[in-house]
Amino acid sequence: MTALHNCLAPAKLNLFLHVTGRRADGFHLLQTVFQLLDYGDLLHFETREDGIIRRTTEVQGIPEDADLIVRAARLLQQALGDKGLSKGINISIEKRLPMGGGLGGGSSDAATTLIALNHLWRAGLNRAQLMELSLRLGADVPFFILGSNAFAEGVGEILTPLDTPHGWFVVIEPGVIVPTPLIFSSPDLTRNTKPITISDFSAAPLGFGKNDLQVVAAKLFPPVAQAIEWLNQYGEARMTGSGACVFCRFDHEPEADKALKAVPAHWQAWKARALARHPLADL
């Protein structure tokens, strides 16, 4: 048996998120910058030789067969054909990222699973092949396999590696789950933000743009609006993804510590450092 333990599935933030249009099939066209954080779920993998894939920890509200980590493992196993018949795995997870938070937790878990099992099972897929395979699990999964921060377009699947500023973030969980379809189906959603270029962002990355989904989520879920208002006293607070988590960036860790210490007790909150590369980028 071989194993990999303490594999970080990092959270992501959308530093901005613009909705620039809508395709004929109803999917929205987006532009965003994905930022990796040094905080996330922890996954542990132990191989088995009987072809069985098991999640060995309970995750509240997520049945094993529906879990993206299990689906990712089975997807890779199927992609290996006859070679995958004997490839099994036990996966345990320390779940720290909230569901419905806009932090990409499930997608990151799936990506970490694919990267780890590609290594443990000696599957031999390169990053481009893993990214293509992972798109079947969701539009955000390829980003976490890419290995770096990125400018994303299309429905989030067109990725360009990008350097982002160093810094620290305080993230607040307002205590609500925001369903993504509800936000994207709202008649109040702005869907015609003018497209930008990567150089537009790179020229002035701090506080660039806005999150077009934020207005809708804040209106429908008052705790999101309250968290933004409170965190705004320390800088420009904004929501990540379709919500519900809210963040503010700081140049230095002591500044983040000061804000984190003051967060009202009825909210969950944590700090994280901006990552330049995925922790498993070299695996």
Image (cartoon, helix red, strand yellow):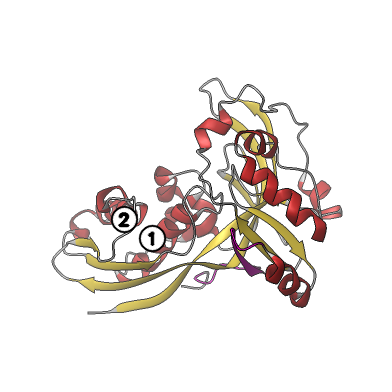
Residue shown at 24%/72% (left/top)?
47
Above-or-below relation of 242 to 251: above
Asked if residue 161 shows in the view, the reply is no
- The x, y position of residue 17, in whole percent, is 68, 42
Near-viewer residue (176 or 84): 176
Near-viewer residue (21 or 92): 92
Question: Mark 1 or mark 2: which comes first in sequence?
Answer: 2
How many numbered circles does the render carry?
A: 2
Circles 1 and 2: CB atoms closer than 8 Å:
yes
The disc placed on residue 114 is 1
Q: Residues within 10 Å of mark 1 (few under 14, many from 20)?
A: many
Determine whether, in the image, residue 206 is placed left or right of residue 211: right
| Kind of residue at disc 2 | Leu
- Quadrant for the N terminus, please: bottom left
The stretch in magenta equals 264-280
Residue shown at 30%/57% (left/top)?
73
- The x, y position of residue 107, in whole percent, is 46, 53
Near-viewer residue (177 or 124): 177
Determine whether, in the image, residue 56 is placed left or right of residue 277: left
Residue shown at 68%/68% (left/top)?
260
Determine whether, in the image, residue 120 is placed left or right of residue 128: left
SS at circle 2: helix
Distance of label 1 from label 2 (alpha carbons): 7 Å
- The x, y position of residue 168, in whole percent, is 71, 69
The disc placed on residue 76 is 2
- The x, y position of residue 240, in whole percent, is 64, 49
The disc placed on residue 136 is none
Q: Is residue 276 magenta?
A: yes
Residue shown at 36%/77% (left/top)?
4
